Image (cartoon, grey):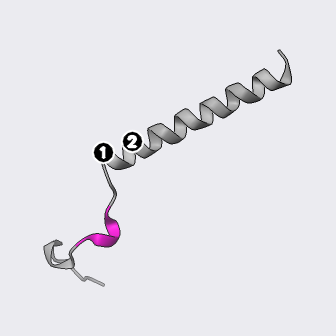
Amino acid sequence: MNLHLLAGVAVLLILVAASAYRDALRNEPIRRHRMNPGKLPPVDEQE
């Protein structure tokens, strides 16, 4: 295999992985910083 072909395949794999990651974030966003504290259950504070 020549080096250019190997580099091209590596770049394509990176682009496919980045695209899949973006689609996963779009479908199931993680919104920890946007959570409303009023909707969380009460926390039991025990020592």
Query: Residue 44: image x %, image y %?
Result: 20, 78
Within 10 Å of disc 1 (Cα), the crowding (few <14, some 14-19, many 20+) is: few
Residue ID at (76%, 29%) = 7
Amino acid bearing label 1: Asn
Looking at the rendered structure, the secondary structure element under dot 2 is: helix
Residue ID at (77%, 24%) = 6
Quadrant for the C terminus in the image: bottom left
The correct choice, above or below, for 19 with respect to 42 in the image is: above
- The answer to whether 40 appears left or right of 26 in the picture is left
The correct choice, above or below, for 29 with respect to 3 in the image is: below
Q: How many marks?
A: 2
Which residue bears the numbered disc 1?
Answer: 27
Which residue bears the numbered disc 2?
Answer: 23
Discs 2, 1 touching: Cβ within 8 Å: yes
Which one is nearer the viewer's eye here, 46 or 27? 27
Residue ID at (81%, 25%) = 4
Query: Residue 10: image x %, image y %?
Result: 69, 30
Looking at the rendered structure, the secondary structure element under dot 1 is: helix
Amino acid bearing label 2: Asp
Give the extent of the magenta segment: 31-35
Is 44 magenta? The answer is no
Classified by dominant secondary structure, the portion drawn in magenta counts as helix
Residue 43 figure quarter: bottom left
Which one is nearer the viewer's eye here, 28 or 16? 16
